């Protein structure tokens, strides 16, 4: 089966064929870099790390562009708050991001453009839009995009202009001809620092957020490229506005496939800084090892919501230990290139070729691990490690992974046994089974009897 990808634009899973044979060009909207990255950000970068890894494993060359937004209202406000320059803030946060995601095994993109390095391209794009009657200047010095003059507006989000107008304010603010219009160039304000301003034919100011990605993607990948990705929250208005700008200027389709990853949720709400319900990557790595966090993020399909909790991370760690335990059972793991005609490998490939189906692919890893446990085959262990490697997993030393962390002491074991008993009494058998599995993964086997539960080393 050839690779098929869900395309947000068509709302269907379509067969993927790159524009240039053997070469995939992909742009993903990256971080607005004013603070540490949280798990929601990690989920986005992990999703497209898996995408680029699988494209490469499929024999394709990948040019992967993931930008850094280093000029924005939030960035300006944070730099002013801290009393440092915008560049000092964004350099600091960019370094922190690189450190954090490297721990998770997220490979760097081919190109990582910074928005502030592409202001001339943005200005050129805005001038083209103005020349085509798609942009206009306001009395305040801003330059806005005229949404109603772009016939295809709403195609990505599936919203008509009437639907978009249903929730708008009655008043037209900030010199807009229409409330749906959005800013391309923001006139400089007296309260903003000097390093937030650029000279232009439109007057001193800075670019709007949406025009940044249009300029960076087309400058690095051409007017039309294969895949445009990002979080589901960017579908509207950011990606909708990118389409309007880029296609309005070039007359060409911006991207053939639009790919969006699902949210990370905490207590049924999207994880975000604005809600204050976020956990930074650094927070989580103080409690869990990096590969466990990677496994937790990868094992859920990239388009599905991901529920964050310590319990789910504990489950991920237990599951990962099962895979490493299988590798540790073999005296010599035989490394080899993956034979995709092997039945296990063929199932894995079919799963990944179906819109990067990591849940089914990881299920294959557990099937291979079960066979390794039974046969103690070095060749099968090598296949397990190689298949895991296409997802960035199982590349560490098995014994080191299994021995990492402090062993459970008697008090901790007794506490977990008590928690399991309480879960059983409450008929929460899933939680009771999870605790049993967690103990077993830590070398503790439980024995239930009429007199109570006892344990022994497994």
Image: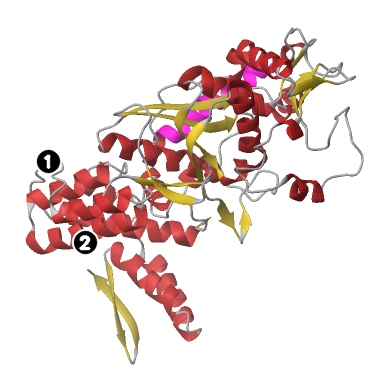
Question: Vertically, is 426 above or below 7?
Answer: below
Q: Is residue 224 magenta?
A: no
Q: Position of residue 109 (x, y in %)?
A: 42, 27
Identify the secondary structure beneath mark 1: loop
Q: Horizontal placement of 71 versus 281: left or right?
A: right
Which residue is depicted at the point 87% across and 16% down?
190
Question: Predominant secondary structure in magenta?
Answer: helix
What segment carries the magenta color?
A: 84-102
Front residue (pair 170, 206): 170
Q: Position of residue 325 (x, y in %)?
A: 21, 56
Indicate which disc, 1 or 2, sits on the residue closer to the N terminus: 1
Q: Which residue is mark 1?
A: 335
Q: Which residue is mark 2?
A: 367
Local packing at callout 1 (Cα closer than 10 Å; few below 14, some 14-19, many 20+) is some
Front residue (pair 276, 162): 162
Q: Is residue 86 magenta?
A: yes
Q: Position of residue 387 (x, y in %)?
A: 23, 46
Front residue (pair 249, 100): 249
Which residue is depicted at the point 26% across and 47% down?
388
Front residue (pair 288, 121): 121
- Asked whether residue 183 is in view, the answer is yes
Identify the secondary structure beneath mark 2: helix
Q: Position of residue 162 (x, y in %)?
A: 77, 48
Image quarter where the C terminus lies is bottom left
Question: Vertically, is 59 above or below 143?
Answer: below
Q: Horizontal placement of 389 versus 203: left or right?
A: left
Local packing at callout 2 (Cα closer than 10 Å; few below 14, some 14-19, many 20+) is some
Count the marks: how many? Answer: 2
């Amino acid at each position: 089966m050839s690779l098929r990808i869900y395309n947000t634009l068509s709302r269907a899973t379509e067969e993927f064929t790159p524009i240039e044979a053997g070469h995939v060009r992909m742009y993903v909207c990256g971080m607005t870099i004013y603070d540490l990255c949280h798990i929601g950000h990690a989920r986005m970068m992990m999703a497209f790390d898996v995408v680029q890894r699988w494209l490469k494993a499929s024999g394709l060359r990948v040019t992967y562009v993931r930008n850094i937004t280093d000029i924005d209202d939030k960035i300006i406000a944070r730099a002013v708050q801290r009393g440092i320059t915008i560049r000092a803030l964004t350099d600091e946060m960019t370094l922190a991001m690189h450190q954090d995601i490297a721990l998770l095994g997220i490979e760097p993109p081919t190109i990582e453009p910074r928005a502030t390095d592409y202001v001339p391209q943005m200005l050129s794009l805005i001038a083209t839009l103005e020349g085509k009657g798609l942009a206009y200047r306001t009395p305040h010095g801003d330059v806005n995009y005229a949404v109603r003059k772009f016939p295809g507006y709403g195609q990505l989000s599936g919203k008509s202009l009437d639907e978009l107008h249903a929730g708008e304010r009655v008043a037209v603010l900030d010199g807009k001809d229409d409330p749906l219009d959005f800013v391309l160039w923001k006139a400089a304000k007296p309260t903003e620092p000097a390093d937030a301003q650029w000279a232009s034919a439109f007057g001193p100011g800075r670019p709007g957020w949406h025009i940044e990605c249009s300029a960076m993607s087309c400058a690095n990948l051409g007017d039309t490229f294969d895949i445009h990705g990002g979080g589901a929250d960017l579908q509207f208005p950011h990606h909708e506005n990118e389409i309007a700008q880029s296609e309005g200027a070039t007359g060409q389709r911006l991207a053939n496939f639009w790919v969006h990853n699902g949210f990370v949720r905490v207590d049924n709400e999207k994880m975000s800084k604005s809600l204050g319900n976020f956990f930074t990557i650094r927070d989580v790595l103080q409690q869990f090892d990096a590969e466990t966090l990677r496994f937790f993020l990868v094992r859920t399909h990239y388009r599905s919501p991901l529920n964050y909790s310590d319990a789910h991370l504990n489950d991920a760690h237990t599951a990962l230990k099962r895979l490493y335990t299988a590798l540790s059972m073999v005296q010599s793991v035989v490394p080899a290139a993956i034979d995709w005609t092997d039945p296990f490998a063929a199932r894995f490939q079919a799963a990944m070729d179906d819109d990067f189906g990591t849940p089914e692919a990881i299920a294959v890893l557990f099937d291979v691990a079960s066979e390794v446990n039974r046969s103690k085959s070095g060749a099968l262990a090598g296949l397990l490690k190689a298949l895991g490697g296409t997802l960035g997993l199982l590349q560490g030393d098995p014994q080191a992974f299994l021995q990492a962390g402090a062993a459970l002491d008697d008090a901790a074991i007794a506490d977990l046994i008590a928690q399991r008993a309480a879960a059983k009494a409450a008929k929460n058998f899933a939680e009771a089974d999870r605790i049993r599995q967690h103990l077993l993964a830590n070398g503790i086997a439980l024995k239930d009897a009429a007199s109570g539960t006892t344990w022994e080393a497994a």
